[in-house]
Amino acid sequence: MLSILALHENTHLIDGCVEILNEEWTRSKAARLHSITKSCSTLPYSLVLVENESTVVGYCRLAKVISDAKSVLVESVVVGKKRRGQGLGRSVMEMAEQHAAREGFQRVYLCTKDKQGFYQHLGYSFCKPVNTVGAMMLETCDCAPETNTPLPVED
Ligand code: ACO
């Protein structure tokens, strides 16, 4: 059984998140902790995909879109290496979208260098750039797909 949990409300999941993030994007544990423990009830907001209530299998983070309080940026989407290709990436995205919608966000943006096929398969499409506050700095997304469901499609 899968659930999506807020990291700041489930700090016992921090080590599992560090593990799957560092499997993909190696950083020191201190640097990783510095970034993921910023998770709070306002953005940035880390979401953890958990199997059977305790095993961390996926992660993503919701961050701010500048001057657009109704939108959110999804970043650092990752599934544990051994668990890829089993539908968990789709679950991370769909459950994060549902979570964002419950929090009042109407649109989801993201940036990707090499996973366009994955996101397009999930219903995202390219849109105009938006300014976001990502993990480390202010940045401009120049390939920000958008979701088509359950959130509205942009012009
Ligand atoms: N192109 C087209 N379709 C794809 C691709 C692809 N590259 N990858 C997966 N799919 C399809 C699958 O076939 C599946 O289709 P189906 O549901 O119709 O059967 C669907 O997408 C869902 O695939 P999952 O099995 O859920 O994907 P997975 O669990 O492997 O997770 C992920 C995908 C998150 C990209 C994983 O491979 C991963 O962690 N990669 C490394 C980290 C990474 O690159 N993250 C994205 C960074 S971009 C960002 O964070 C915004």
Image: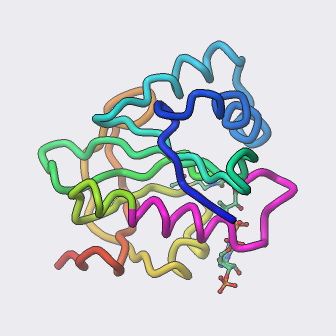
In the displayed structure, 21 sits above or below 112; it is above
Start and end of the magenta stretch?
Answer: 79-98
Ligand 1: image quarter: bottom right
Q: Where is residue 38 in the image (x, y as percent from the top left)?
A: 43, 24
Q: Position of residue 93 (x, y in %)?
A: 51, 64
Left or right? Give the position of 47 relative to 53.
left
Residue that appears at 28% across and 42% down: 64
Q: Is residue 124 above or below residue 33?
A: below
Q: Does the magenta stretch include residue 84?
A: yes
Q: In which quarter of the image is the C terminus?
A: bottom left
Q: Toward which corner of the image does residue 83 lie, by quadrant?
A: bottom right
Nearest the viewer among 24 and 150 is 150
Q: Is residue 78 left or right of residue 68?
A: right
- Give how far across and how far down residue 18 sits, in percent: 69, 31
At 28% from the left edge and 35% from the top edge, which residue is drawn? 42
Instruction: Please report the residue visible at 77 percent of the width from the left and 51 percent of the height from the top.
Output: 80
Q: Which residue occupies 37% across, 28% down?
A: 137
State the residue in front, 109 or 59. 59
Furthest-left residue in view? 67
Q: Judge whether 135 appears above or below 47 on screen.
A: above
What secondary structure is the stretch in magenta mostly built from?
A: helix
Q: Does the magenta stretch include residue 60?
A: no
Residue farthest toward the top in the current orientation of the protein: 30
Q: In which quarter of the image is residue 3?
A: bottom right
Q: Is residue 13 left or right of residue 133?
A: right
Q: Nearer the viewer, residue 140 or 28?
A: 28
